[in-house]
Image (tube, rainbow, N blue to C red):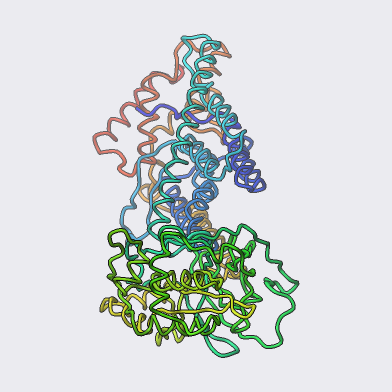
Amino acid sequence: MNRPAYQTPRWLLGALFLFWGVNSDMPVYGLMAALLVEGSYLVKRKWELTRDDFIRVSDVSSFIMLGSILLIYLTNEPWQIMRRFVIWLPIIHLPLLLSQLYSTSDRIVIGTRLGLRKGREPHAHRPFNLTWIYAALLVFSAAAANSRAVWFFPFLVLFAVWALFNYRGRRYPAALWTGGMVIVAVVSLFTALSLNNAFLYSQDRLMEYYQLWFARFYADPFKSDTNLGSLSAFKASSRILMRVRPGDGPGAPYYLTDGVFDTYAVTSWYNRDPRSRPVPLDENARWVLREPAPPVEARVDISAWLPRNKGVLPLPQGAHLVSRLNAAGLKELALGPVLVEEGPELLDYTAHYLPGADHAAPPSDRDLMVPADELPGLDAAIAEMAPATGDPRAVIDALDHFFLFRFTYSLDAVPYAKQRTAVSNFLMNQRRGHCEYFATATVLLLRRLGIPARYKTGFLVDEWSPIEETYVVRERHGHAWATAWVGGAWIDLDTTPPGWIVTESLAAGPFERVRDLFAYLGYRYEKFRQLKDERVNQALLAGIVILSAILLYRIYAQRRRKEAGAGGLTDLMQYDTPGKDSPFHAVAELLATIGVARLDHETYGRWALRIDEVRRGRGDANTPFVDEEFMALLSLHERYRFDPRGLTAEEKERFIADATAWLERHRPKQ
């Protein structure tokens, strides 16, 4: 038997909508929704919505949800989509809540006709009370929007106490109940704090693994693991990280830099210069690295993925200006790298640069430091190399000749030997390795010969994509080289033997072009999504509103047509809407004749609770009307009206018989 549904206390849903609006920074929407919800108590006439009407409202709500998902997906970064969707759920499904509050039923039917052929029975669930579910949804959405404000938990406890107070057990005094709620609140607070700490710990650990897995994807401007001890899997990866389109000037730059390091220890390079400065933004929305701009410059357009929304900005050597970059801020380190403090997942920008220039800070004592355990190997290599003079350019020529003719590029170098470091083993025994071996050895040899040098990391721009008609930069194009201080300026020096690109590309599988095609489609989609054209967003929103209004109008128009044509139809056609021929209407008419008619704004459940209270107030409640039989009739009536399964023939006969018996028993005697 379905008893009257326990509704949420009056004003609670309105207060929760205001709570949600404040947390989600949408107080106006919260206030408007609160007025609509609480306005249901002030409306004197409510709608007699049928099961089919509720199903149509469900379809409207489903359509609004799908449109909202599309709108949120097109206007937010991927990591924001789920959170924004959860925040908007109370507004998306508001039609469902309003259809219950403004109807004569204290329950709602959720179903759909979408995808069904005409005349087929719609999918529908049994009637249920939506108000408590919606209260929980408002709390959940407010929690998703909350930025850990200190007042959130106290208000949450207040709402919980408010919701439960009217339905507390009457066996115990209010003071004892209040004390129990205080204990529950304290335990909940400590539980919430513990869960929050566990979440933060898990998040930190997951981010560590995440960064380790995508280490090459996110360049660290203060440390570079050279992989002298183990070969990086990214040397064989064909994932596309950047797209480079040459503009004015000599074409695409040979290198894009994302790290410069001045200190070597064990097998890693570090940036020990902590100095940095914010990059200013001029009146033309351009990030100015150097002023004034050189009279002759080159330009290159770069699209680079930045999944963590912060990291190093790959730039050509000599960059002095960055335009078209949508970022919250840029910071330039003293050694040259530029950091994006906050930006979109896909960076799209133009780098203006002067080929051959390098604006990094002049050398310091760290640029001549050589670890003591590397000296034997370096000295042996210098003796073999035997530069003709101490002139820096002659030394550089000797280094080029030494590595070109006596070393080979390889991805399977053995890093260590007994009592020798990885660099010493590379110089004295193995004489083969990948770019990190060559760059590290070159920097240390230059320093040993008295020439300041630094270790650089970045990417080689070399591969032209016929599919995209642009240069593509893959993970395996990640590279390392040296930069030396010669003649009062930094010059790049790459001693890795030529042909290493071909060697690494041989590891690419046969389906690389297929993956490239899907990568390009993903790239074009992300470009479209990042347009964030306000006109497109407004058009989508207007489409959602217009189509939703059309569906709602169809509900209203269909009901008007049925009401207008009801008089000329046969009895069978007159009662084609479930519940209109319910025998319970005769029960309601009897109660109306004795002065306890159901009000237009009143649900059947609230009316049932009021009937005997009114009669007792008038002193004529000798025979209670709201008894077990009455509630059984009300339950059958609601099943007949709203349950998609309806009543069986047997149940309908019993329904008519029980209603007739109840009327005979309670009809006033003549």
Q: Is residue 405 above or below residue 232?
A: below
Total number of numbered labels?
Answer: 0
- State the image coordinates of residue 307 (x, y, percent, origin top left): 48, 62
Which picture quadrant has residue 290? bottom right
In the foreground, 347 or 17: 347
Q: Is residue 72 visible in this depiction of the protein?
A: no
Q: Is residue 278 above or below residue 196?
A: below
Question: Where's residue 140, x and y in %?
Answer: 50, 40
In the displayed structure image, the side of residue 334 where residue 630 appears, left or right: left
Q: Nearer the viewer, residue 518 or 194?
A: 194
Q: Is residue 124 left or right of residue 525?
A: left
Q: Quadrant of residue 466?
A: bottom left
Q: Is residue 382 above or below residue 636?
A: below
Indicate whether 579 appears above or below 373: above
Place of residue 29 in the rendered image (x, y in percent of width and height, measured from the top left): 63, 48
Lateral position of residue 451 relative to residue 434, left or right: right
The residue drawn where x is 41% and y is 53% is 569
Q: Quadrant location of the N terminus?
A: top left
Q: Nearer the viewer, residue 188 or 594?
A: 188
- Provide residue 606's location: percent of width, then percent of height: 51, 28
Q: 246 or 649: nearer the eye?
A: 246
